[in-house]
Image (tube, helix red, strand yellow):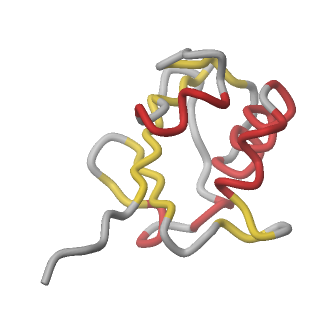
């Protein structure tokens, strides 16, 4: 079963859990399973069926945007990370 690491700002929507085990053969299926388990998280990750532009998903050090996006296949022992973009400054 793959796992997804949840960044601190989004843990309010996962009952404080930092790492969640998910089912799925692709990144998209894993994220759908995650949001089935924690429905309030969906609005923070997706615009309808598309990943929000400021949400980055990594498998190890690889950004899925440079792979096959949500269709990227994952293995049962993969660890995914959600990395929200940070903007600001002068």
Position of 68 compared to 44: left or right?
left
Q: How many marks?
A: 0
Position of 9 compared to 28: left or right?
left
Position of 13 compared to 69: left or right?
right
Quarter of the view holding residue 79: top left
Q: Position of residue 72 (x, y in %)?
A: 59, 56
Q: Residue at x 70, y 38 (%)?
A: 30
Up the image or down, 28 lies above or below 79; here it is below
Quarter of the picture containing the C terminus is bottom left
Q: Observer-nearest residue: 16 or 73? A: 16
Q: Position of residue 82 (x, y in %)?
A: 47, 45
> Farthest residue toward the left?
90
Quarter of the picture containing the N terminus is top right
Position of 3 compared to 63: left or right?
right
Q: Observer-nearest residue: 72 or 3? A: 3
Quarter of the view holding residue 81: top left
Q: Residue at x 61, y 48 (%)?
A: 73
Q: Residue at x 65, y 55 (%)?
A: 45
Up the image or down, 61 lies above or below 48; here it is above
Q: Residue at x 58, y 24 (%)?
A: 2
> Farthest residue toward the front?
90
């Amino acid at each position: 079963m793959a796992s997804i690491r949840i960044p601190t700002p989004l843990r309010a929507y996962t009952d404080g859990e930092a790492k969640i085990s998910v089912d799925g053969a692709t990144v998209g299926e894993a994220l759908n399973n995650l949001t089935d388990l924690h429905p309030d998280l969906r609005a923070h990750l997706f615009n309808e069926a598309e990943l929000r532009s400021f949400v980055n998903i990594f498998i190890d050090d690889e950004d899925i945007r440079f792979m096959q996006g949500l269709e990227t296949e994952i293995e049962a022992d993969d660890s995914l990370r959600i990395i929200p973009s940070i903007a600001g400054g002068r």
